[in-house]
Amino acid sequence: MLLFETFIKGREEVILRQTDEIAEISTPVIRVWDGILALPIIGTLDSSRTQIVMENLLQEIVETGSSIAILDISGVPAVDSLVAQHLIKTVSATRLMGAECIISGIRPEIAQTVVHLGIDLSNIITKASLASALSYAFRVLRLEVRKSSAISKTNL
Amino acid sequence: MITGTRKKPMMMILSLSKDTIQVQKEQDVVLLRNRIREVAVKIKMGLVNQTKLITAASELLRNMLRYGGGGKCLIEVVTRGRDNGVRLTFSDQGPGIPDIAAAMQDGFSTGKSLGLGLPGAKRLSNEFDLKSKPGEGTVVMILKWANG
Ligand SMILES: Nc1ncnc2c1ncn2[C@@H]1O[C@H](COP(=O)(O)OP(=O)(O)OP(=O)(O)O)[C@@H](O)[C@H]1O
Ligand SMILES: [Mg+2]
């Protein structure tokens, strides 16, 4: 009986440690462009996860001098009031650092749910996809993506 | 508990399956949400309703953990005529809610939070019922029809 309990305890510790490790590796900050950071979030955004996301993000903003961060939530299964609060906090913290934070990847079912829940995200810049967030960021930074008129083979 | 004897016009709500899950810690939330999703998928609930149900459940689960000191959740597949749905009953033996009318208001929170959990869960569900007695605990029932 005691042996069994020790075994269970050991397993629990392993699982807890793995949870921490997964939380860290699954929140990368990507430098998509000079001045633009992207954070794809996959899975549940709980309090400890948000803490890691926020720390990583703020750190990268300082290091890269980025002025725009895109938080992509297409991989987040549900946005309840706690997750929404975490998102709002992250956006506020980013603003305090002098950068703007865009939330992208809001799926239609998430948008409808958030509205019924009564959460006000109107103060946050939101985009349906990472692509539209990126093009918004380009516009803010006055960058232009154009098709070149002639294809020069040497550049390919 | 609310069983098949609701005073709904003519048709009764029957429970087809029952499953009780204990919720004591943060990690149980993800597990339970996945169970609810499985059940919802099984009765062919659409994605929007699934998301609404899971989000409402998530609010009630967090309340149960935060204010009720943990508790349990009964997951039922229910049927009424041709409609199938998922009924969830969250019960805890925590301090209870002294003023239910106040707690159901948008923005009311004793935990310095948004105060959207209870009213939001009600808006996201087809049926909502809250019973609470100070000192005894809280029972919250929500029901979402597959095509509701
Ligand atoms: N299971 C419960 N036991 C005791 N009190 C509860 C319970 N659930 C809710 N309450 C009380 O009702 C209030 C309103 O709950 P509600 O979920 O609407 O808001 P919140 O949890 O404070 O904030 P949010 O859910 O937006 O983060 C809570 O602040 C709490 O005082
Ligand atoms: Mg709540």
Image: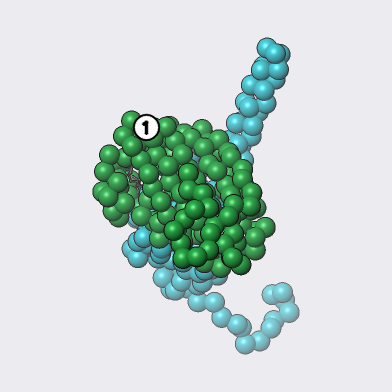
Chain colours: A cyan, B green
Q: Which residue is mark 1?
A: B136
Question: Above or below — where is A149 with respect to A34?
Answer: below
**Which corner quadrant holds the N terminus of chain A?**
top right
On screen, residue A122 versus residue B61, left or right, reads: left
User: Is residue A26 among what the camera can see?
Assistant: no
Q: Quadrant of the C terminus of chain A?
A: bottom right
Q: Estimate the x, y position of residue B54 in percent, counting from the top left.
A: 53, 54
Name the residue located 33 percent from the left edge and 37 percent from the top edge.
B133
Q: Is residue A128 visible?
A: yes
Q: Nearer the viewer, residue B53 or B88?
A: B88
Position of residue A114 relative to residue A12, above or below, is below
Seen at 63% across and 52% down, the residue is B16
Seen at 60% across and 82% down, the residue is A147
Q: Residue furthest top?
A: A2
Nearer to the camera, B132 or B66: B132
Q: Nearer the viewer, residue B72 or A11?
A: B72
Q: Position of residue A35 (x, y in %)?
A: 47, 60
User: Image point 54% across, 57% down: which residue?
Assistant: B13
Amino acid carrying label 1: it is: Glu
* For residue B112, side relative to residue B81 (left or right): left
Q: Chain of mark 1?
A: B
Measured as percent of width and height from the top left, residue B83 is found at 59, 65
Q: State the residue in front, A68 or A9.
A: A9
Q: Is residue A41 left or right of residue A69?
A: right
A103 relative position to B50: left or right: left
**How many labels were placed on the picture?**
1
Quadrant of residue B80 within the rendered picture: bottom right
Mark 1 Cα within 10 Å, few/some/many (few <14, many 20+)?
A: few
The reply to whether the residue tagged 1 has its Cβ within 8 angstroms of ligand 1 is no
Q: Position of residue A111 (x, y in %)?
A: 47, 65
SS class of the residue under badge 1?
loop
